[in-house]
Amino acid sequence: MKYTPFGEFYKILRIKNHENLNDASNLLDVSPAFISSVECGKRPVPDDWYNILCKHYSLSQTEQSQLKDAIDASQTIVKLGLLNASLQQRKVAVAFQRSFDNLNEEVANELLKILNKVKK
């Protein structure tokens, strides 16, 4: 079975805390099959899982960052809400979407640098 970065992170977290899939199922209020499908990338990581896992496992800042990175790296679809976006922001979003499949690693790294500056 192939796991996503989130699936690997969460499985290791459960093992470290001596929890099985049924324990996780009770914590997240979903079936074990649903968790398994998320871990394998067949379903996206639900938005509320980040906060639930951080709180339940009392994750350190480093672990929270690792969890966030694992969730981000496991995404297969990204949706943007453009309702409150400016015209320029809309243009950027659409241009990015159109050119995404043609981005090479060098350009992707440059874009990440720019976007990380905006976050700060």
Image: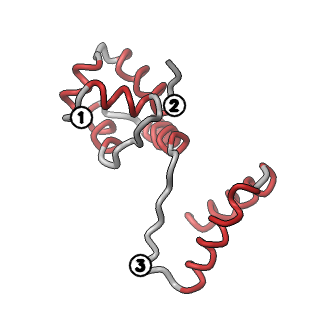
Secondary structure at badge 1 equals: helix
Q: Is residue 101 left or right of residue 94?
A: right
Disc 1, disc 3: CB below 8 Å?
no
| Image x and y of residue 36, in percent | 37, 26
Question: Residue at point 76% right, 56% down?
Answer: 102
| Image x and y of residue 99, in percent | 71, 64
Q: Which residue is mark 2?
A: 4
Residue type, label 2 = Thr
Viewer-closest of 100 and 60: 100
Q: Which residue is mark 1?
A: 28
Q: Which residue is mark 3?
A: 83
| CA neighbours of label 1 inside 10 A, class few (<14), some (14 to 19), many (20+) | some
Viewer-closest of 45 and 13: 45
Residue type, label 3 = Leu
Quadrant of residue 33 within the rendered picture:
top left
| Image x and y of residue 80, in percent | 47, 65
Q: Is residue 112 above or below residue 55?
A: below
Colour scheme shown: secondary structure
Question: Residue at point 53% right, 22% down?
Answer: 2
